[in-house]
Amino acid sequence: MESLYQILNLIATALLIPTIIALIFLFIRALLLIGTFYGTYADRAKFRKNILPVFKDIQIGPGDYTVKTQKRHIMSVYLQKMNAIEWKGVQALKLLSEMQMEYKKQLEPLKILMRSGPMLGLMGTLIPMGPALAGLASGDISSMALNMQLAFSTTVLGIFIGLTSFILLEVQKRWANEDCAELEYLYELIQENEKFHKDAEHQNEGYK
């Protein structure tokens, strides 16, 4: 039984270095995402400033609603695709679904980061606790202090990664919901507008 304990301890100890490396990588990734977030926010603000008047025009019909932005904007791409099919039929509904899936795909890295950061932080906390307790039992206070410091440091990194990715995920999820809702509104508005004009044409033909 003791040999089994030793094997488990050896495996857990061997995972410490990969865990620390992964935490450092995710920490750098989180910092980069914070920087990218500002660029995304500025690009989105510019895009929406140009596109929002479109949604306020009640006489809207199929046209060119694509606004040039500094970075690739999903809604701009799908506006162009909708224009290409003239907002008609099942194809338009399929594009709406594809846009929602595109946003979900874009948010997946943040979801993974939000969950993996705290998990790795917990692993980095628990693994050094064994050597720390062993150091305490043998009276090696310096070894215990070093392992406890490592445990607390990995905890802080994991929490920072999880908190950062959670905030970015929630904000970008709200943006995605707004864009999808507004594209669906524009689609319904165009369909009603075309139906109104068709009904008006039929009435005019009836009078003739």
Image (cartoon, rainbow, N blue to C red):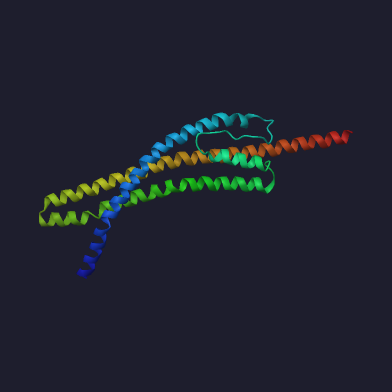
In the image, is 98 to the left or to the right of 135? right
User: In the picture, residue 204 is in which quadrant?
Assistant: top right
Location of residue 46 in the rendering, given as x and y in whole percent from the top left corner: 52, 30
Q: Residue at x 33, y 42 (%)?
A: 160
Give the residue at x 33% y 47%: 25
Q: Is residue 147 left or right of residue 186?
A: left
Question: Up-down: is 23 above or below 175?
Answer: below
Residue that appears at 46% across and 48% down: 108
| Viewer-closest of 13 and 138 | 13
Residue 97 in percent (x, y) is at 59, 47
Residue with the most extreme left position = 139
Left or right of residue 191: residue 45: left
Q: Quadrant of residue 56?
A: top right
Quarter of the image containing the N terminus? bottom left
Q: Quadrant of the C terminus?
A: top right
Going by the picture, which residue comes out furthest to the right? 208
Where is 98 relative to 61, above or below? below
Q: Position of residue 172 (x, y in %)?
A: 47, 40
138 on left or right of 164: left
Q: Residue at x 65, y 29 (%)?
A: 57
